Amino acid sequence: MIRRWLFADQLGPHFLDAPRQPVLLVESKAVFRRRAFHRQKAHLVLSALRHRAAELGDQAIFLRTETYSEALRKVSGEPLDVCHPTSRRARSFVQSLDGVTVLPPRGFTTSPSEFVTWADGRHGRLRMEDFYRDARRRLDVLMDGDTPAGGKWNLDAENRQPPPSSGVEVPAPPMPVEDEIDEGVRADLDRWEREGIRFVGRDGPRLFPATRREALARLRHFVEHRLPAFGPYEDAMLAEDPWMAHSLLSAPLNLGLIDPLDAVHRAEAAYRSGSAPLSSAEGFIRQLIGWRDYIWHLYWYFGSGYTAADGLRATRAVPSWFRDLDADALEARCLSDVLAGVRDRGWVHHIPRLMVLGNYALQRGWRPAEIVDWFHRSFVDGYEWVMTANVIGMSQYADLGAMTTKPYAAGGAYINRMSDYCRGCRYDPRSRLGVNACPYTAGYWSFLDRNRGRLLGNARIGQAMRQLDRLEDLGAVRDQERERGDAAP
């Protein structure tokens, strides 16, 4: 059987055709020279790769080299095949190699041909909800015949509850126990830093699964103990509870340790057995066969030029305090806590990403391509394919609606409703002017004012634009925000 070359995000058994298929694994040091990745992300990727090599034993050739090219020279003459990589750069590289067969992608639930057929049939109107419903039908997930389970496709309305004052009462997720492989990774990263390779964020205990066994343990625990509470509070934020009832499975999914359909079927089984409400199962499943696949396919469908999209003319550089995760420089409690979460864990859940980090960058007009790169480097689950459409299209609205219907901009009222951050913060979410003006509230109106010509035709923000025209202090808000600029709030 031909040897399968596995990249470090293709580590599950579903990337092999047979249990004893010979394998090539390569650890390329040059990858970490190109970008300043989060230290914990580098640790996780290297730990996962080395654990997989240890599991496979003599079934695998494991090469630790400066570059992939150097490793391939060591196995020259042996034919290889490889599953479609997850970045354009890697795909171009493997396609240029003699003796390497590139197979279709794995680790997703919709094939490229299925997505292209669906997308081409939409005549330019691409919406995740439409794709998700199509996927539900094709995969026969949460369907009762031709009807969605419960009679509704989307239960978002039940999943937008603010956080309970007592917190979300669920068992803590199982955490990995580091071993000698992790010790070796940490020692190597310390040495690389001394040699001049730069990382961002803080080192810390490994928080995310690096093996399939760890990943399945977390998946089982989530479905059994945390899934029931996931749905209602999936959009809520609490300063003292970064995990809430979230699955914490994005990193092992993106390492290829879990087959997403396996996770989907387990969640559906929990609903069918009565151990989890439909709203929670549907919300989780939508993240996998809906949003995750949608983002993956849009990365390829939109092509390389999409990263340069800048329909809102956002030209300001990302400031150093944000780029370097300097949470201690901030007084805005929400932004400080979320940025500290990125610094200390390399992870916050999807609402802090979108409505605290992304929302602030959108309001300030920071360059979308820089924000993509920042998310890619700073998150343990961040990859180019993950972040491109998520940031360009959804978070920064730089494509002016090619993949979503409105900019995700909001003032302090949203953060106050969906979190406990505003309690004790020096800024008042109700104020847009003055020394206590919330940077999100003031920033929201400044954003709308700056982009009114580009957003005027968007019906979903029509009410906000009409309200903008009724603000008597708009000129003062505009001057205030221009003076505030990109200073740490």
Image (cartoon, rainbow, N blue to C red):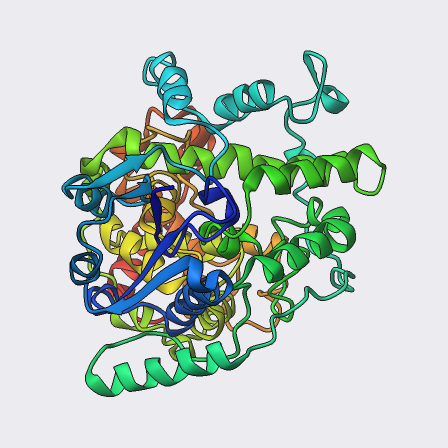
Residue at the spot x=22%, y=57% of the render?
75
**x 46%, y 55%: residue:** 353
Count of picture labels? 0
Residue 398 vertical placement versus 54 (above, below): above
Quadrant placement of the C terminus: bottom left
x, y (%) of residue 205? Answer: 53, 78
Q: Position of residue 21 (x, y in %)?
A: 44, 47
Q: Residue at x 33, y 15 (%)?
A: 120
From the viewer's perspective, is residue 45 above or below residue 300? below
Report which quarter residue 100 is drawn in: top left
Q: Is residue 432 visible?
A: no
Residue 265 horizontal/vertical position (percent)? 67, 36
Residue 430 seen in the figure: yes
Image-based side of 6 in relation to 29, left or right:
right
Q: Residue at x 35, y 32 (%)?
A: 104
- Residue 449 occupies quadrant: top left
Q: Please state which of residues 296 and 444 is positioned toward the viewer in this rendering.
A: 296
Above or below for 447 versus 281: below
Residue 204 percent coordinates (x, y): 49, 80
Q: Is residue 96 left or right of residue 292?
A: left
Q: Is 93 or 397 nearer to us in this picture?
A: 93
Horizontal side of residue 179 vs 38, given as left or right: right
